[in-house]
């Protein structure tokens, strides 16, 4: 199964295998790191981003702030 990933910094989209879920990836476009949520947490992560008033920061432990 493939998932579509989008860099929160530059907006670059690309396809990844599902192994990328719950891992930190480096964007091939801007070279910044970001965390891909677990597949069962995608809806929760989407709602967090949608309801944020500014930017969203995800730390190395996967905690979201914003």
Image (spheres, rainbow, N blue to C red):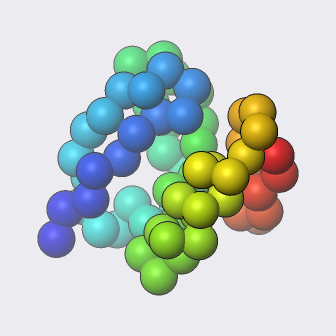
The image quadrant of residue 2 is: bottom left
The percent coordinates of residue 23 (x first, y second) are 52, 60
As drawn, the residue found furthest toward the bottom would be 40
Residue situated in front as seen by the camera: 25 or 37: 37
The percent coordinates of residue 29 (x first, y second) are 39, 19
The percent coordinates of residue 9 (x first, y second) are 57, 25
The percent coordinates of residue 54 (x first, y second) are 76, 33
Label total for image: 0
Residue situated in front as seen by the camera: 63 or 51: 51
Residue drawn at (62%, 50%) of the image: 49
As drawn, the residue found furthest toward the left would be 1
Asked if residue 22 shows in the view, the reply is no
Residue situated in front as seen by the camera: 22 or 51: 51
Q: Is residue 32 left or right of residue 20?
A: right
Instruction: Say which quadrant the N terminus sits in.
Output: bottom left
Residue drawn at (49%, 45%) of the image: 25
Work out whether 45 lies above or below 35. Answer: below
Residue drawn at (36%, 47%) of the image: 5
Work out whether 44 lies above or below 11. Answer: below
Work out whether 15 lies above or below 45. Answer: above
Q: Is residue 41 left or right of residue 12?
A: right
Q: Is residue 1 left or right of residue 46?
A: left
Residue situated in front as seen by the camera: 17 or 45: 45
Asked if residue 19 shows in the view, the reply is yes
The image quadrant of residue 34 is: top right
């Amino acid at each position: 199964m493939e998932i579509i990933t989008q860099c929160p910094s530059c907006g670059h989209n690309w396809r990844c295998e599902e192994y990328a879920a719950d891992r930190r990836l480096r964007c091939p476009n801007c070279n910044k790191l970001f965390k891909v949520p677990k597949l069962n947490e995608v809806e929760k992560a989407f709602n967090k981003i949608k309801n944020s008033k500014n930017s969203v920061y995800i730390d190395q432990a996967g905690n979201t702030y914003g």
